[in-house]
Amino acid sequence: MQFPPWTSIDDAARLLHDGEVVAIPTETVYGLAGNAYLPSALAQIFAIKERPTFDPLIVHICEISQLADIAENIPDVAYALAKAYWPGPMTMILPKKECIPDLCTSGLPSVAVRFPSHPVAQEIIWKAGVPLAAPSANLFKHVSPTTAEHVAAQLADRGLAGIVDGGPCNVGVESTIVSLVGEPTVLRPGAITPEMIAKVIGDVKVKESTSKPGQAMAAPGQCDTHYRPQVPLFYGEIPEGFELPKNCVRIAFGNRPGVIPATLNLSESGNMLEATAKLYAYMHDLDDPKYDLILVDPIPNVGVGMALNDRLKRASIKIIDSNR
Ligand code: TXA
Ligand code: MG
């Protein structure tokens, strides 16, 4: 097989149906997909990513009507949210149906479901004829891929059957996760903000970020050190008097002056959606051993900015001088 194993939509659909693992584009990040009904495919996903099996997977569908194949006791608020924001970057947690293997949900009685808006993702799911379980197509705890090249760089030689190139992801961070088991709660911020969800279903809680140094993870997948590049990244204001290492680079946001000139700018005009679409690509671009430190400017913690703050806090070293 040629490496990277670039694959057509039709081949990907056939391979996925038959139980192979294929990386596919979505509007948020690339996913490492497998047939959600087949424990053997799910096991391969965990193995390729080196992801612990206590971290459950999201199941991807291509029609709202498929929700009832996967989840049960679906509340009206789920259909209201699906109507408002699907297809799109929102995942709902609902009580799972028997047909979804425990491996997919890490033994939880609930399942995460998402209907992506990327036309290539939709076509692959449709042609595969089965829902696809897909975590982000990166090694566990590494930065999520927003291009097919990012996927190839991390995973091409790890036994996946193919990678479908659908171009750069236009949202750029993982979907918003909203749990509808019990009180509606946003578990992971994303492009669909809590305000947007509240507009449809009324009040929604937002789970506190667990991103505190030295703390165990409070929920599956909420690891403090998710999304880390190999080069130390520091997010926030540089402490007064801190001496920067020689090869320091800076990801700027807006046009505020920084301690060093901007190497890359997420959005000169301070546009949050533009910044979201660029963040992971910039983290990949600057994750080069020739650099000693990546600095990232503070981003306002409002709207989609909450998703950026969540990911950047997890990506950041916690103490700037002891980690150099
Ligand atoms: O945008 C996305 O959501 C991307 C694309 C590929 O769709 N996928 C993605 O998957 O980000 P992943 O596996 O990297 O993150 C899924 C998160 C994990 O943190 C996991 O803990 C959580 O979803 N999750 C999955 N099932 C859950 C459940 N039943 N209850 C609570 N959290 C769940
Ligand atoms: Mg992930």
Image (spheres, helix red, strand yellow):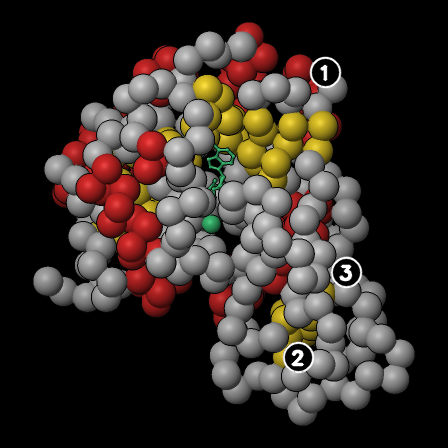
Binning the other alpha carbons within 10 Å of mark 1 as few (below 14), some (14 to 19) or many (20 upward) gives few
Disc 2 marks a residue whose amino acid type is: Asn
Disc 3 marks a residue whose amino acid type is: Pro
Q: Is residue 113 visible?
A: no
Quick one: SS at disc 2? loop
Q: CA distance from mark 1 to mark 2?
A: 43 Å
Going from N to C along the chain, the mark reached first, 2 or 3, is 3
Q: Nearer the viewer, residue 15 or 53?
A: 53
Disc 1 marks a residue whose amino acid type is: Gly
Going from N to C along the chain, the mark reached first, 1 or 2, is 1
Q: Which residue is mark 2?
A: 323
x, y percent for residue 115: 42, 28
**Residue at 37% over, 13% down:** 68
Task: Kindly indicate the quadrant of the structure image that contains residue 35.
Answer: top left
Binning the other alpha carbons within 10 Å of mark 3 as few (below 14), some (14 to 19) or many (20 upward) gives some
Q: CA distance from mark 2 to mark 3?
A: 20 Å
x, y percent for residue 286: 54, 73
Q: Which residue is mark 3?
A: 298
Asked if ligand 1 lies within 8 A of label 1, the reply is: no
x, y percent for residue 320: 73, 76
Q: Is residue 21 left or right of residue 137?
A: left
Binning the other alpha carbons within 10 Å of mark 2 as few (below 14), some (14 to 19) or many (20 upward) gives few
Task: Kindly indicate the quadrant of the structure image that contains residue 116.
Answer: top left
x, y percent for residue 180: 57, 21
Q: Is residue 213 left or right of residue 102?
A: right
**Residue at 64% over, 32% down:** 186
Q: Which residue is mark 1?
A: 202
Q: Nearer the viewer, residue 139 or 123?
A: 139
